[in-house]
Amino acid sequence: MGFDLKREKILVTGAAGFIGSALIYRLIRQGINVIGIDNLNNYYDNNLKKLRIKRIENIDKYNLFKFLECSIDNQLIFKIFEKNNPHIVINLAAQAGVRYSITNPSSYIKSNIIGFSNILEACRKYPVKNLIYASSSSVYGSNTNLPFNEDADTDSPISLYAATKKSNEIMAHSYSHLYNIPSIGLRFFTVYGPWGRPDMAPMIFADSLRKNLPIKIFNNGDMKRDFTFIEDVVDAIIECCQKPANLNQDLKKIKKLNYVPHKIFNVGNGNPVQLLDFISFLENKFKIKAIKEYMPIQPGDVKDTFADISKLNEWIGFTPKTDILEGVEKFSNWYINYYKM
């Protein structure tokens, strides 16, 4: 038994972001009411963000989508909750990027810590049925025990970005315990696909090929990533929306075990790919030979990521539908069209 999302009002933060916009696009197509929040900052190409919102508005025939420009670290967020009374909150707003956190730490504290605390407080003051929030595979740090399992030690983050995401998980757990807020944290693994983020490897590789520039290949190419296609990620979020962490729990059992309605899940493909292989797939699709510049590993980077997705499969029956070749094909087709190659 789950929620009928057509009867629920959903608030999505990070609405103009890669995952947020893809999620809202799907929800609107399914006839679901969505309030989208984004501050439209300049961390990367603002025009891309605005086009993502425009893409949603173009299919919104029944005025299901309301977009509000606002930062989650702004006190206005509480007025938005009070006025709109969302039933389900999906927090995807964050200052992203491992490497950027090394040179711009204050923006991560502001958005990922203060902003997320505002979301939690708003969910406490204006009770919600379900809170979904974005965590990251970066919380596993330099853990070499592959595949990464949710029960693995995550107490040694190697970037401030990872530290803020780990903090989000702890904060959400405490709010779930104290105020009985059903919440689910999703540890995303290298999400890629159409309308992707320009600061992530797939877009960086594609940009370099298009502009005939060298591709910086870190750790001399000895790196693997669990590339996860955007539509599979959207599937996972929507299914988790319909199954809160306290759904169908026996109340006596909850009291006896001091059950906290908070869960953490990996969202990955479960099939890591060598970065050099990913570049090769793009070369074949673009029919352009890459200029490769081999470099040592960057501070804050991890060598390999590999998601154990068995817990998410048990919870919602999650199985990724898109293999790497199909995903690269769809991403490349979008990229070639978007940049008119």
Image: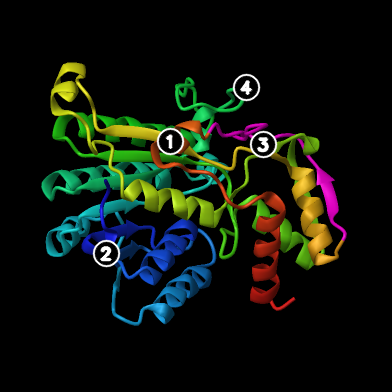
| Relative side of 72 to 58, left or right | left
Q: Which of marks 2 and 4 is nearer the N terminus?
A: 2
Q: Residue 88: x, y in percent?
A: 25, 53
| Relative side of 2 to 337, left or right | left
Q: What residue is shown at x 50% (from left), y 27% (from top)?
A: 157
The three-letter code of the residue at mark 1 reads: Phe
Q: What stretch is highlighted in magenta?
A: 289-308
Say if 152 sits above or below 172 in the image. above
Residue on which disc 3 sits: 298
Q: Which of marks 4 and 1 is nearer the N terminus?
A: 4
Number of the front mark, 3 or 4: 4
Residue on which disc 1 sits: 265
Q: Which of marks 1 and 3 is nearer the N terminus?
A: 1
- Labelled pair 3, 4 in contact (Cβ < 8 Å): no
Q: What residue is shown at x 58% (from left), y 45% (from top)?
A: 190
Residue on which disc 4 sits: 144
Residue on which disc 2 sits: 6
